[in-house]
Image (spheres, rainbow, N blue to C red):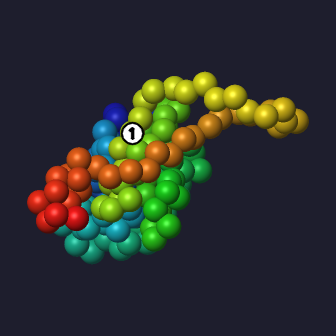
Amino acid sequence: MNKYTHFHLRLTPQRVAILDYLDGNKSHPSAEDIYQAVAKRFPTMSLATVYNTLSALERRGQLLKLTIDPSKARYDPNTSPHHHLICTLCKTIADVDTHYRLSLPDTEFEVTGSHVEFYGTCPKCRKDSCKTGN
């Protein structure tokens, strides 16, 4: 029995490789990142296979599609409620597992969830900036 059978997907070797790559991955990779990593093992695999797999996982609630980076979608296998830190220079995304209580103005909305994005400069970019004097 495969550890991914609960995903209810047809488990081809390529899909298993994609799932293996995503398992515990905290780098919030793009489809292209995933393709480049998995294509080393499956050179005949297409980028469409990656997109189709990501789409199927997203529809099943087993993957979050992040639209934080306007240049490309990123994916998060951590589907538990959490927030993100985004480096404005290198676009690194990090998870924030702290929960925040936010006061909202009176609204007729029934709030079912929230996601907070924090923007700033990551330690590596700050260090690089200090080296170059910027």
Screen quadrant of the N terminus: top left
Residue named by callout 1: 95
Is residue 9 something one can see in this rendering?
Answer: no
**Above or below, 43 relative to 124:** below
Screen quadrant of the C terminus: bottom left
Quarter-of-image position of residue 115: top right
Q: Residue at the spot x=11%, y=60% of the render?
A: 131
Residue type pointed to by label 1: Asp
Residue 17 at what x, y percent from top left?
Answer: 29, 53
Residue 29 at what x, y percent from top left?
Answer: 35, 56
Who is closer to the viewer here, 1 or 4?
Answer: 4
Residue 127 at what x, y percent from top left?
Answer: 17, 53
- Left or right of 121? Residue 78 is right
* Secondary structure type for disc 1: strand
Q: Residue at the spot x=38%, y=72% of the render?
A: 47
**Above or below, 134 relative to 84:** below
**Which residue is outermost to the front?**
133
- Left or right of 88? Residue 126 is left
**Which residue is outermost to the left?**
131
Who is closer to the viewer here, 132 or 77?
Answer: 132
Residue 96 at what x, y percent from top left?
Answer: 41, 35
Who is closer to the viewer here, 22 or 44?
Answer: 22
Is residue 47 something one can see in this rendering?
Answer: yes
Who is closer to the viewer here, 60 or 100?
Answer: 100
Q: Residue at the spot x=54%, y=50% of the render?
A: 58
- Badge 1: few (under 14), some or many (20 or more) residues near its Cα, within 10 Å? some
Quarter-of-image position of residue 116: top right
